[in-house]
Image (cartoon, helix red, strand yellow):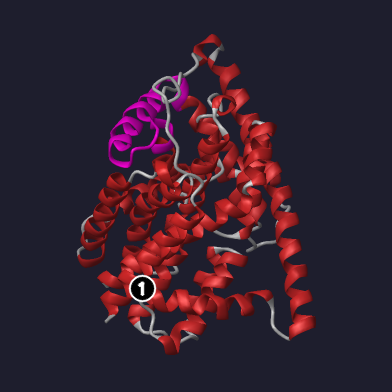
Amino acid sequence: MQILIGMIGIVLVLGVCYLVSSSRQQIKWKNIGLLLILQFLFGFVLLKTSVGTAVVGVFAKGFEQLLMFAGEGVNFVFAGIANKGQAPFFLNVLMPIVFISAIIGILRYIKILPFFMKWVGLGLSYLNGMGKLESYNGVASGILGQSEVFISFKKELALLSEKRLLSMSISAMSTVSMSIVGSYMALIEPRYVISALVLNLFGGFIISSLINPYELTSEEDQFSVADDKEQTFFQMLGEYILDGFHVAVTVAAMLIGFVAAIAMINAIFKGITGLTFQEILGYIFAPLAFLSGIPWHEAVDAGSLMATKLVTNEFVAMTELANGQWNFSQHTTAILSVFMVSFANFSSIGIISGAMKGLNEEKGNLVAKHGLKILFGATLVSFLSAMIAGILV
């Protein structure tokens, strides 16, 4: 029964994508079928075995080390601003973007990043039927994060069409940054984090290919890498550092506005209905939680946590899940854990559009225009991954 319900859920998710597709005739069903098979294959290996745990752990530790280096610079400038023992989001999450941006600039300058962009994009594009840059973006988003990834191909942004930006934004919001994987692993089981990283990669390609299919000409599918050596090394480094700071500040401004607006909406709903917006979404999400493989007697509470993740962020939802006050079964905990490992929430609309605006205002406005559609697609990616996990665990 569990497998049947999960399969029904997957069919419904794909059916919804088909109904809202911008061009059903251009959907590449063969590639989507292949990506679904790969999702199940990798999901089985990661959820049923310990393969991959050590590798991802090494990557996570590497990024934690980078963040420690970034912390040295942040502490030098902002030492004493935060209360002892406190961890302000702006200082600990956004300011390290400046250092990550500098690393991206260096990797691009010495031609490592362009090489990676070319060959990873080429390899994945054969599987997913998408463009090389779209394929690169899916992998790079899971390494760099949904705001930093756009810095890595900022010179190509001006050439991208509205459709390509939409697909890239869905992929970016569907992933998480490798730099915070270690934090997730402190709250939920590492194997669920690892599984979600891989499932969401393929899921992002599947959902964006269904919602937003398009064809690229051979000319459009080429991305030229500008020769950064026209600048001196330190000119390049200064440019990327300032780009990173611009992105961080813009994202902070967007977050302030979005989080405040959501708090106001919750208060309005509470005053009118006696329920917050999140609580109402919990009842709406209950059927989707059930289709993910969660028993009905746990579906409303699970739906509430799913809604919390959507309205606030994954850290808030993971912390509530880790507190253990819900008494969920191990099966339900596994499904919820996989669902939570993504950036699909309302605040991310501000983060992605803000990051894009910091690099190219015109493209940032296009992303903001499709903000809800991007969130809708990324949320479906989370549900698709959760449903596959529900079948396998």
Residue 310 shows up from this direction: yes
Tell me: residue 383, above or below residue 38.
below
Who is closer to the viewer here, 304 or 66? 304
Quadrant in which the C terminus is drawn: bottom left
Magenta-colored stretch includes residue 113? yes
* Neighbours of disc 1 within 10 Å: few (<14), some (14-19), many (20+): many
Magenta-colored stretch includes residue 254? no
Tell me: residue 60, above or below residue 276.
above
Residue name at image x 51 percent, y 36 percent: 164
Disc 1 marks a residue whose amino acid type is Ala
Element type at mark 1: helix
Q: Position of residue 204 (x, y in %)?
A: 42, 50
**Which residue lies under the disc numbered 1?**
334
Who is closer to the viewer here, 227 or 274? 274
* 77 sits to left or right of 231: right
Q: Residue furthest bottom?
A: 297
* 129 sits to left or right of 154: left
Q: Position of residue 269 (x, y in %)?
A: 74, 77
* 390 sits to left or right of 109: left
Q: Residue furthest top?
A: 230
Magenta part of the chain: 107-135
Tell me: residue 309, above or below residue 329.
above
Tell me: residue 328, above or below residue 9.
below
Residue name at image x 37 percent, y 59 percent: 196
Provide the major secondary structure of the magenta segment.
Answer: helix
Quadrant in which the N terminus is drawn: bottom left
Residue name at image x 66 percent, y 45 percent: 368
Res 7 → quadrant: bottom left
